[in-house]
Image (tube, rainbow, N blue to C red):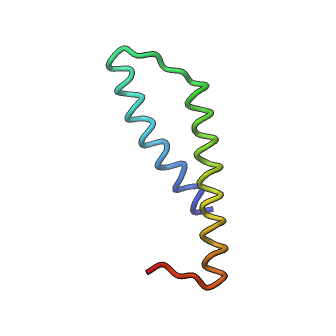
Amino acid sequence: MHALVAGAGVFVVVQSFFLLVRVATGGEVRVSRIITAFSLALVASVCGGMLGSFMQKSGVRPR
């Protein structure tokens, strides 16, 4: 669950910054691209969280 929340939080912060830049410069905002990127970021964060959990259970610890 932590990976999901962290992934979503980072995505929202970064995407909102670049969205503001794009709107300020008069660029085109494509909502479908944002939604697609958000879903891919969530999948990647869940996969990373599962991998980290598996590695910790098998005895691998961060240095």
Q: Is residue 39 above or below residue 56?
A: above
> Which residue is most to the bottom?
59
Looking at this view, is 6 or 41 the one in front? 41
The x and y percentages for residue 43 are 65, 49
Looking at this view, is 56 or 16 the one in front? 56
Q: Quadrant of the C terminus?
A: bottom left
Q: Quadrant of residue 24?
A: top left
Q: Quadrant of residue 13?
A: top left
For image coordinates 61% across by 85% down, the residue present is 59
The x and y percentages for residue 11 are 49, 44
For image coordinates 46% across by 16% down, the residue present is 28
Q: Is residue 35 above or below residue 6?
A: above
Looking at this view, is 44 or 38 the one in front? 44
20 left or right of 51 in image: left
For image coordinates 60% across by 79% down, the residue present is 56
Q: Quadrant of residue 3?
A: bottom right
Q: Is residue 59 above or below residue 28?
A: below
The x and y percentages for residue 1 are 63, 62
